[in-house]
Amino acid sequence: MRAATRGRAAWIGAALAIGVIAGTAPAGADGAVVATAAASVTPNPAFVANATDAVNPALGAGARVHIVVNDGQGGQTLVSLEVDGLPAGRSFGAHLHRDSCSSAFGGPHYQAPDPASPVAANADADHEAWLDFTTNAAGRGRALAVVPFEVQPGARAVVIHQGEHTMAGGTAGQRLACIDVSI
Ligand SMILES: [Cu+2]
């Protein structure tokens, strides 16, 4: 395991231990919860079912998204996604997107260092928050990503994709559903 990976894992543990997931840290403090969204997933009206798309996006799934910013270690963001109401035992690609669900269904991926001008060269898990997950037998899935940048405030979204995982270059198939996250 690389040192950087160990460092991230340790930080996740510390964040959980001090209760930031529960929202106990004050806004602006290290590890503070800066955004929490709990909402019905918005199905993509433009989704087109085909032979490889096993999921009906109009499933009424529920989802919670927590975003935690840590200022103490050079600017990191922890993004956690919990979703339920999806088919059991199925993997999905998911990401933090730059815009709200009502703006081009989330717009492009949120990308550091310049969200306004995402570039293909930075379409990776160090510059974007990738949240791929696999559902359990009850149709629940969760993902946790720690990224080495701070997410700037704004109306963002998490988008769940039809593809089973995010490919090199950041693609994960059609957009199935969207969850608004105001940061
Ligand atoms: Cu995406």
Image: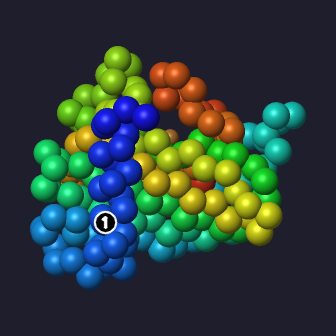
Residue found 21% across the figure and 33% down from its top: 113
In the drawing, does residue 129 fall left or right of residue 151?
Answer: right
Q: Position of residue 2 (x, y in %)?
A: 37, 32
Residue 97 appears in the figure: no
Q: Residue furthest top?
A: 121
**Looking at the figure, which quarter contains the C terminus?**
bottom left
Image position of 54 with respect to 37: above or below: above
Image position of 92 with respect to 52: above or below: below
Residue found 68% across the figure and 39% down from its top: 164
In the drawing, does residue 152 fall left or right of residue 51?
Answer: left
Q: 114 or 77: nearer the eye?
A: 77
- In the picture of the structure, the residue carrying the numbered disc 1 is 15
Q: Position of residue 13 (x, y in %)?
A: 36, 62
Q: Amino acid at mark 1?
A: Ala
Residue found 42% across the figure and 49% down from its top: 145
In the drawing, does residue 162 fall left or right of residue 27?
Answer: right
Q: Residues within 10 Å of mark 1 (few under 14, many from 20)?
A: many
